[in-house]
Image (cartoon, rainbow, N blue to C red):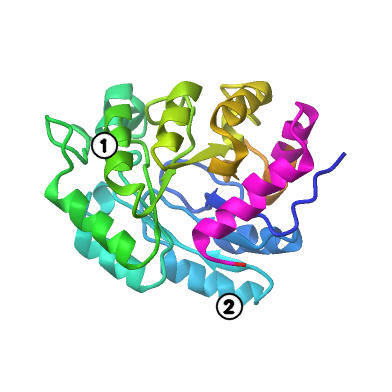
């Protein structure tokens, strides 16, 4: 069976050109293919550049059948956790602010940053006592003011808990590609359950279990979904790598795989359509 993904929203779509990886689609192709698949929205993600202006251009190209959004990653290219850059991005319509990703201390410690030529020591969002830094508080306030989404990026597990405890009851927090082995803290299903109980949304991405970079099985993703509950999960792709399916097609493959592993269509549509659209504020 092919799951009906009409109205889906991918909150994690990569595109080219990109300084770190060869990409499968450019932003216009990603938007056009998502629209062709009947999706309701797509969020363009770059580790290196804010994408709200690009999303505006893609929106003009694809028309009103789909909403195209941008975001900003708080990596070294924009000055780290930089409230001024975040304020500009949100003012231009960015819908997601990711905390440090490839420039995070976590990815430096993992060795991911070095593989990509990104210098250390890496960016953190908390101090030595796990308290949020002043600039982190400023960014959270801006996200709240603009009713945007704060995504955890690739920060450490301890930083995840600090962010979620501080912000999830009053703002929208999305745990970025939870359980991913290749970047970030490799959260367990149990940690995802705890973070969801604290008010976070848990993003589970296709790249983690499908394609040339997969490190988990679809069955393991279903286990995490069962641990957390579909009402707290969003399904995205994290695709855009040359080695992997195109994002829109990959979301369909992911949904069909989850169905084959025992989830029903209503649960999958809740996670792929209803929950991400609720976070974005689109109907």
Q: In which quarter of the image is residue 59?
A: bottom right
Residue at 41 percent of width and 70 percent of height: 93
The residue at the far right in this view is: 1
**Residue 233 seen in the figure:** no
Label 1: element kind = helix
Horizontal arrangement in the rendering, residue 55 relative to residue 115 (left or right): right
**Residue in the image at 49% along x and 53% along y:** 17
User: The C terminus appears in which quarter of the rendering?
Assistant: bottom right
Q: How crowded is mark 1: few (under 14 residues within 10 Å), some or many (20 or more)?
A: some
x and y, in percent, of residue 96 in the image: 42, 57
Q: Identify the residue at horizontal 56%, vertical 26% (top origin).
A: 227
Of 157 and 216, the residue lying toward us: 157
Residue 162 marker: 1
Which SS class for mark 2? helix
- Dot 2 or dot 1: first in sequence order is 2
Q: Residue 77 carries which label?
A: none
Residue at 36% across, 28% down? 112
| Placement of 233 over or under 181, stated as above or below | below
- Residue at which label 2 appears: 60
What span is in magenta?
Answer: 254-282
Examine the rendering and report whether any part of residue 189 can be seen. Answer: yes
| Label 2 – label 1 distance at C-alpha | 39 Å
The quarter of the rendered structure image containing the N terminus is: top right
Q: Is residue 263 magenta?
A: yes
Query: Left of 233 or right of it: where is 82?
Result: left
Q: Where is residue 229 in the image (x, y as percent from the top left)?
A: 58, 35
Q: Is residue 245 above or below residue 48?
A: above
Which secondary structure dominates the residues rendered in magenta?
helix
């Amino acid at each position: 069976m092919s799951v009906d993904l009409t109205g889906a929203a991918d909150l994690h779509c990569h595109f080219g050109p990109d300084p770190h990886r060869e990409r499968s689609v450019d932003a216009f192709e990603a938007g056009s293919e998502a629209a062709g698949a009947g999706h309701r929205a797509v969020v363009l993600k770059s580790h290196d550049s804010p994408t709200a202006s690009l999303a505006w251009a893609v929106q003009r190209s694809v028309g009103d059948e789909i909403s195209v959004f941008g975001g900003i990653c708080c990596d070294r290219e924009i000055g780290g956790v930089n409230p001024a850059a975040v304020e500009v991005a949100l003012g231009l319509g960015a819908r997601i602010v990711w905390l440090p990703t490839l420039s995070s201390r976590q990815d430096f410690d993992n060795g991911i940053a070095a593989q990509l030529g990104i210098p250390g020591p890496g960016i953190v969002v908390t101090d030595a006592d796990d308290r949020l830094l002043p600039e982190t508080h400023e960014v959270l306030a801006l996200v709240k003011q603009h009713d945007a989404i704060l995504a955890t990026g690739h920060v450490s597990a301890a930083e995840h808990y600090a962010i979620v405890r501080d912000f999830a009851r009053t703002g929208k927090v999305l745990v970025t590609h939870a359980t991913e082995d290749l970047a970030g803290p490799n959260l367990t299903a149990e940690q995802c359950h705890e973070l969801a109980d604290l008010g976070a949304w848990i993003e589970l991405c296709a790249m983690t279990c499908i394609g040339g970079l997969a490190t988990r099985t679809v069955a393991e993703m279903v286990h995490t979904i069962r641990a957390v509950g579909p009402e707290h999960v969003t399904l995205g792709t994290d695709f855009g790598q040359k080695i992997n399916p195109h994002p829109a097609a990959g979301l369909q493959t992911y949904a069909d795989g989850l169905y084959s592993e025992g989830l029903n269509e209503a649960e999958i549509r809740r996670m792929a359509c209803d929950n991400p659209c609720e976070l974005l504020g689109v109907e």
